[in-house]
Image (cartoon, rainbow, N blue to C red):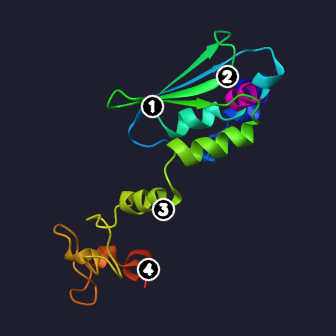
Amino acid sequence: MPFMKGAAPVRRTVKYLTSGKLVLKDRVKIFSVNYNVHGDHHAGARDFVFWHLPQIQYKNPEVQVVTFKNMTPSPFVRCYFDDGKQMLIDVDSRTREEIMEHLIKVVGKSKEQLHSEEVSAEKKDNPANFGYGCDRKCICEIPGQLPCPGVVPLPFHMRGKYKWEQSS
């Protein structure tokens, strides 16, 4: 498989991408990370970009994610909001886990908010559903369907015992 080649190909699997913890707030429109490829105090930002940035892009498709390499003396994350404001987050000498925890607290949605959005996203009043707990108890209530065999008997050509046992 060609997608399993390169450095840490697990980063391109759907299971890995969906396991990301950071879902940005709706107000965040641009998420930028500035870091250098050399230097000990940039190591956490480099690891964060390598391991967590694909997850952030997958979980937040409406947010523009930008990285700037070798343009700053100290690493930082900048978030641009829809009202024109910006938030600057210093990630100097932090590990990738510390950066992720801090971003979840500052610009991420809370677990309660994620849970409430997940529940509201489930469409429970689908008109195609029928059975216990739905609007229709039986498919025969939908216009154009055959009535229940208990109310109106099925035609002989739809019954198995007449269709398969015609020799007797």
Whichever of labels 4 and 1 marks the residue nearer the N terminus, that label is 1
Using the image, determine if residue 37 lies above or below residue 44.
Answer: above
* Mark 4 closeness class: few <14, some 14–19, many ≥20 residues within 10 Å: few
Q: Quick check: marks 2 and 3 in contact, CB under 8 Å?
A: no
Q: Mark 4 or mark 2, which is nearer the start of the sequence? A: 2
Q: Which residue is under mark 2?
A: 75
Q: CA distance from mark 4 to mark 3?
A: 66 Å
Which residue is labeled 4 in the image? 167
Magenta highlight on residue 119:
no
Residue drawn at the location 58% of the way across and 46% of the way down: 104
**How far is mark 2 from mark 4, CA to CA?**
84 Å
Which of disc 3 and disc 4 is earlier in sequence? 3
Which disc, if any, is residue 112? 3
* Magenta residues, start to end: 44-50
Label 2: state its secondary structure: loop
Residue 48 pos. (x, y %)? 70, 32
The kind of residue tagged 2 is: Pro
Labels 1 & 2 near each other (Cβ < 8 A): no
Q: Amino acid at mark 1?
A: Val
> What is the three-letter code of the residue carrying label 3?
Glu
